[in-house]
Amino acid sequence: MMSEATIIPVVMPKWGLSMREGIVNEWLVDEGEEITPGMPILNVETDKIANAVEATDGGVLRRKVAGEGDVLPVKALLGVLAPPTVSEGQIDDFIQSWVVADVDEDDEEQVSVDRFIEVNDLRVRYVRKGEGTETLLFIHGFGGDLNNWLFNLDAFPDATVVALDLPAHGQTETRLTGNSLAALAGFVIEFMQALEMPAAHLIGHSLGGAIAAQLALDAPQRVRSLTLIGSAGFGPEINLSYTQGFIDAQSRRDLKPVVELLFADTELVSRQLLDDLLKYKRLDGVTDCLQQLHDGLFSGGQTSLPGQRLSGLTPPLLLIWGEEDAIVPPEHAALAPAGSRVVRIAGAGHMPQMEKSAQVNQLLQQHVSGER
Amino acid sequence: MARKLSMKMAINEAIDQEMARDPSVIMLGEDIVGGMGSEGEKDAWGGVLGVTKGLYAKHGDRLLDTPLSESAYVGAAIGAAACGMRPIAELMFIDFMGVCFDQIFNQAAKFRYMFGGKAETPVVIRAMVGAGFRAAAQHSQMLTPIFTHIPGLKVICPSTPYDTKGLLIQAIRDNDPVIFCEHKNLYGLEGEVPEKPYAIPFGEASIVRDGRDVSIITYGLMVHRALDAAQQLAQQGINVEVVDLRSLSPLDLDTVIETVENTGRLVVVDEAHPRCNIATDIAALVGQHAFHALKAPVEMVCAPHTPVPFSPTLEDQYIPSAARIIDAVKRTFSYRGKQ
């Protein structure tokens, strides 16, 4: 008899701490279709976000278990991948025997609940997951927060994964400790010290990429590898109608077209995403802090370009760019130092870690483990 | 996890944070400090339902207990606003507004206009609205339409603790008179509220549920009845979009039109009496601006044109229910045009 290992379940994902169930919106593939890793299989929507569930393994989609419109708990069986050699009966047995594992609430709270720490008199929110020897530190971009890594933080079960909210971002205190790249990199170094994290693999997105690059120049001993996604800090151009538009937008109506610039597929900009961004932007002081950051970093184009001063090899450098990035031009990838690995992802905009998360996670896993 | 607060405590926190931020914020009302102002009883009560509890201890005599004369202290608040303070006047029930209509309609609402923009009246008048509290005809009305009718007043009626804090902070910072309507049956409702202060701009409706088949536009307590109806209808395959106006004046007409253009069907739910209310206003505006999008006549679900009954059985029948909303939604689907 065929071993069950060749049957691969497609299950309801868990996107973030609060997710308990999701709605199956639409199947994107048909039964009998050959699936490759990273391929979007179906669209799932939660009360927070809508996104595609991407294949983690390859195979033929043998069965759609979930119907469109079904509301199902996390880890529920949505579909079954298997090679053609597996019989229909075996697939029936597999589906019959599928049990939705209980999400262990205590365990879950323990590993992924928001934490806070004082850094330089600033109350900083962060998350920490896992207990591995290698540490990954995720740094979000301008106007973002650690939830920008919603689809990435769970992809490294063997590592210690940490993500923070930068000053005046997310749920970190609304105050700046400086509005230069050097000041921001210095802040992240202090955060690493406060967490007793001597060195880490840095993953930075957009402004977070420029901060990671600056940190690698200022404190090379703290950086095991660098992954910069849609990164600032390589060339002078940046889409100021996005950065200033984000600061100025006060209503859902004004914010929507601005946030749509981030994605290749603008359908991903849900009403809930906009409401959550507005909740952040409306906090007293946020607009002022964002404007100060913007004036220090972007106005008149980027002037501080640490990316150009990096070496490609020490630490190992991976650059990921969405082909349709409308904020930081993908052409900046050409400015990457010799020896770095550059991957441009089709069908993604400025947020490839959300739009093409499976592909980005795979690249990250390879880069962090030293595979090229 | 974000912190949860009741709507009552969200109001308390908004006033507390604004009083701490701006020394010109003061508060006037009946029993807001303590029982009759007598020694030893200060801060014992904090308003008729305890909304201002604890504020006297923090902000002292910037909270003024007034005599039982709404006409006097609402007038005083409006005068103080015209002279540069940012007063919050609390009326126990909106039903008591009748005795201060001149101060509100003829004075506060007119100053900016009649003084050529040189005078501002940054006053907030807070009051409880709505039925379901077994408080009879003189303490249960939904008088939002009366104030919405008057140019120069801004009228707010929130449905969640998050919106309540942000809109009340905006009301206090706003330079025009704001009538802030708090549904008494929502005071105990809990929801996530950031600890930091934040202001929600007026004139933006909130879409509280996405749907593509039919729109329900409403505000206040009725938002929750509409969500209840929407949940039941979803099980029957009808996807309802629910829009919470939250700001009745200024009105977010763009979102009203947009949701009707998306769905083609509209039910407006209003706890106020059925003539000249928010529902009739929305229905008329949609008829004028989005007629092209309508697949069926606009349905309205309102309270009857009678005073609020004291009998609990009758009062429960009086307030629009999820069942009545569901019936109205279904009527928009059974419409077949002129026979």
Image (cartoon, coloured by chain):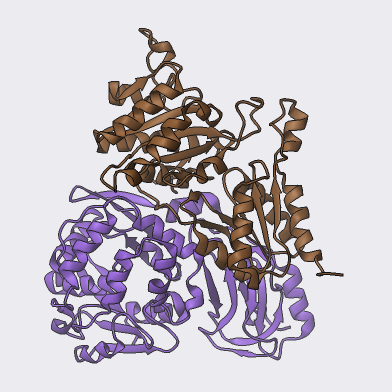
Chain colours: A purple, B brown
Q: Horizontal placement of A322 versus B186: left or right? A: left
Q: Is residue A342 above or below residue A275?
A: below
Image quadrant where residue B22 sits: top left
Residue B46 place in picture, x, y as percent:
43, 22
Give the residue displayed 66% in from the left and 45% down from the top.
B275
Residues A68 and B73: in front is B73
In the rendered image, which quarter contains the C terminus of chain A? Answer: bottom left
Q: Horizontal placement of A212 versus B224: left or right? A: left
Residues B178 and A3: in front is B178
Give the residue displayed 66% in from the left and 32% down from the top.
B132
Residues A86 and B254: in front is B254
Residue A13 place in picture, x, y as percent:
56, 68
Q: Is residue A205 above or below residue A107?
A: below
Residue A348 place in picture, x, y as percent:
42, 83
Residues A150 and A202: in front is A150
Image quadrant where residue A241 sits: bottom left
Residue A21 in sight here: no
In the rendered image, which quarter contains the N terminus of chain A? Answer: bottom right
Q: How many marks?
A: 0
Extreme residue toward the right, this view: B339
Q: Horizontal placement of B269 versus A329: left or right? A: right
Give the residue displayed 71% in from the left and 73% down from the top.
A67
Q: Is residue A83 above or below residue B224?
A: below
Q: Horizontal placement of A313 versus A247: left or right? A: left
Residue A68 in sight here: yes
